[in-house]
Image: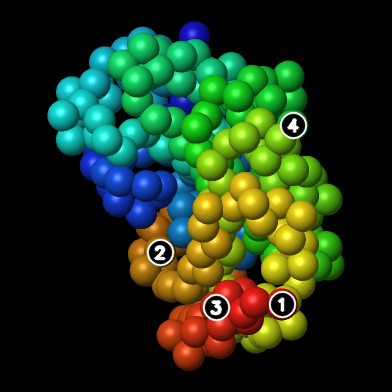
Amino acid sequence: MKGVISSFQSLGTVDGPGVRSVVFAAGCPLRCAYCHNPETWEKKGEEWEAAALAEKIFRFYPYIKNGGVTFSGGEPLMQGEFFCELAGILKEKNLSVALDTSGNWRDDFTLPLLDASDIILLDIKFTSEEYYARTTRGSMKKALPFPALSAAKKKRVWIRQVVLEIVNDGEENAEKLKRLLAPFSGAIEKLELLPFRKICQSKYDRMNIVFPCKDLAETSQITLDRMNAVLQAKD
Ligand code: SF4
């Protein structure tokens, strides 16, 4: 079947372990105020048959055979059937599949796509429903079952959160995140705090839309260090 792809990165090193090809799905149910990829919001892009996209990916096999392929976006769960088919073809060459998701989507292909993935990169955007709804237009309640589901399916789990100064930059938020994830800590391989950056401003300018976080300060290393200290402290 056909999927709608916003862009394709042949080789990347920041979306999962090792060197990976990254497929950016078009379409996202959220509208995060700090989004770096506003061009992926609508389901508009190139249409690809799963087999044809797999052929393109296999050209990079020598480089990604020890890393793999990451499905990112946008929200790949919104095209679960397509990505299940693509994962199936990639598995024929033993390529590792990572699913980069906010967990804010659920349909009949969500669990099969979790099954087909080796690594779940779950973006827990905020630890309060109020901030989550206000800043992403999504729901923390929808995302929260994903750590448990991923752990139950014995997947490798990487948790990520973008840190915005003033919004979720405090030690209190770090404590909350730690408590939230404590029941699944055995399954979580990595917990990454990512700094908010404004390099996406030019994308908003090109799309002629306002970047809601244009006046927010970029996240400092001091803030990240303070929060990481809380996350890493033994209780
Ligand atoms: S989930 Fe990702 S792609 Fe979607 S709006 Fe948020 S940051 Fe952007």
Question: Which of the two discs, 3 and 2, sits closer to the camera?
Answer: 3
Residue 61 drawn above or below residue 193 = above
Give whichever of discs 4 and 1 has the lower sequence position.
Answer: 4
The spot of residue 37 in percent (x, y) is: 46, 53
Q: Nearer the viewer, residue 140 or 92?
A: 92
Mark 4, other Cα within 10 Å: few <14 / some 14–19 / many ≥20: few
Q: Which residue is mark 3?
A: 228
How far is disc 3 from disc 4 in space, using C-alphas? 31 Å
Q: Which residue is mark 1?
A: 235
Q: Is residue 201 left or right of residue 235?
A: left
How far is disc 1 from disc 3 in space, using C-alphas? 14 Å
Element class at badge 4 = loop
Three-letter amino acid code of the residue under disc 4: Arg
How far is disc 2 from disc 4 in space, using C-alphas? 28 Å
Three-letter amino acid code of the residue under disc 1: Asp
Residue 125 drawn above or below residue 167 = above
Three-letter amino acid code of the residue under disc 2: Cys
Give whichever of discs 3 and 2 has the lower sequence position.
Answer: 2
The spot of residue 80 in percent (x, y) is: 60, 23
Disc 4 Cβ-to-ligand 1 distance below 8 Å? no
Q: Which residue is mark 4?
A: 106
| Label placed on residue 200 | 2
